[in-house]
Amino acid sequence: MDRYDIVVVGGGPGGYIAAIRAVQLGFKAAIVEKEEKLGGVCLNWGCIPTKSILRASEVYGLIKKSERFGIKVKDVSFDIQSIVKYSKNIIDKLSSSLSYLMKKNDIKVYHGFGKLVGNCTIRIFSSGKEQEISSKHIILATGVRARNLPGVEVDGDLIWSARHAVAPEKLPKSLLIIGSGAIGVEFASFCSTLGVDVSIIEVKDTILPLEDRDISGLAQEIFMKQGIKIYTNNSIKTVTKNRGSVKVQLSSGKSKEFDRVIVAVGVQANTENIGLENTKIKLSPSGFIETNEWYETCEPNIYAIGDVAGPPCLAHKASYEAMICVEKIAGKGTHVLKKECIPNCTYSHPQIASVGLTEEQAIKGGYDIKVGKFYSNFNGKSIVFDETGGLVKTVIDKKTGELLGAHLLGAEVTELVSNFVFAKQIEATDLDIKSTIFPHPTVSEMIHESVLAADNESLNS
């Protein structure tokens, strides 16, 4: 039987980072991965492929409006198969990089389905064969999968999950997206830019319900101007599959027909059949593995990180948790994750990003706040890029000057948000940001202006 110090079940952005960090700290490590390639949903069906196809649609959209910049282009078209190929080439490149990292760090990868047999043994099922390996410590990083919606069966033909939508053979003429979180909005943006008649249905009163109300409201206005139809305060009553189309009746009473439907209503943890019944591990009411702040489960020597350990289900959170978990095992003086410092990003056009408390959350939390807003139509670089209509909003504690939250909408704000994450991580105040020199002309100047605006000191609006 092969023996290790640390074995990670799952090779996604939490799992492979945990294994690499383990080796860096002197442990003998291995990964058990059920799929053919490492990288998890993030690399193979989620983060990377969606951003690849979104980039392709963004380029197409930019070319379509090139006359605004004095450039004339005739007969602009796209080929969806070539877009998907572009995405797959990127996946293959990054997958090869991961394989190299495993060899470089001498990490053994077992391809098969891993199941716990007590707290120090894993049974691996692969191609009809079984083998067992043992480890002093086991880290569960099995991730999540798309949640099913009762009455709306994903078949890969008329009704898609994100896995189907990220690599379509052809685009439909009309599309309904159920759910308006990051996944739903990103697919809406991609398809709409390429000419698909897109509709979104959301059970809550606004799209992007986890975002600040100002941001979600502005995003909804912009998407509707782009031609995306949005039905909030609505749910699916019935779904009827026809030949080549899907008829959907909404709770509002409206009935519509679509070529395809994408179900994007959240995720559920991959905890089935991994041997939890052979341990003392507990699940939360929503089905995620319960851990403490060091990712220790109720079973000694077994840990859980990433999506399977609970929301927010984000690749960067999983990777960060992996490092904390392994460093704790190594006895290093590490620190717990600050959940208020985890950024959220949606890569639609325009992009949305945030970190920390929304204005509503800050008020409910008892803070006496001041709020700064700065719109991109007053920012020189945004005007140059023809990317006006964006917003940077900051929520600040009046008493201490602490940055409680930052909420952004606009071009490349998924890059800008890291400035706010860093500010929160080092507990910078509004005075620190005010005293920082931001280069001109850059979109980053909106950070400075937003904080200034909280005290009615904005210099350019």
Image (cartoon, rainbow, N blue to C red):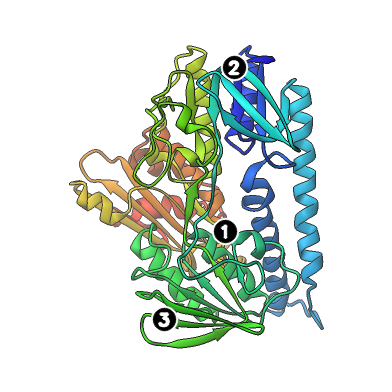
Question: At which x and y percent is residue 105?
Answer: 73, 21
Determine the image quadrant of residue 454.
bottom left
Report the residue marked by disc 3: 250
Q: Secondary structure at mark 3?
A: strand
Inspect the image, locate mark 3, and give the three-letter code of the amino acid beneath it: Leu
| Residue type indicated by callout 1 | Tyr
Badge 2: residue crowd in 10 Å (few <14, some 14–19, many ≥20): many
Reading the image, the residue beneath label 2 is 135
Q: Secondary structure at mark 2?
A: strand
How many neighbours does mark 3 have within 10 angstroms: few (below 14), some (14-19), or many (20 or more)? Answer: some
The residue lying toward the viewer, choosing from 56 and 403, is 56
Q: Nearer the viewer, mark 2 or mark 1?
A: 2
Residue 236 in the figure: left or right of residue 66: left
Per the model, the C-alpha gap separating discs 2 and 1 is 39 Å
In this rendering, position of residue 362 left or right of residue 115 = left
| Foreground residue among 372 and 120 | 120
Image vertical order of residue 366 relative to residue 217, above or below: above
Q: Are marks 2 and 1 in contact (CB under 8 Å)?
A: no
Q: Is residue 359 visible?
A: yes
Residue at image position (34%, 74%) is: 233
**Residue at point 71%, 63% (across, down):** 167
The residue pinned by badge 1 equals 347
Mark 2 vs 1, N-terminal side: 2
> Is 448 in front, or is 217?
217
In the picture, the quarter occupied by the N terminus is top right
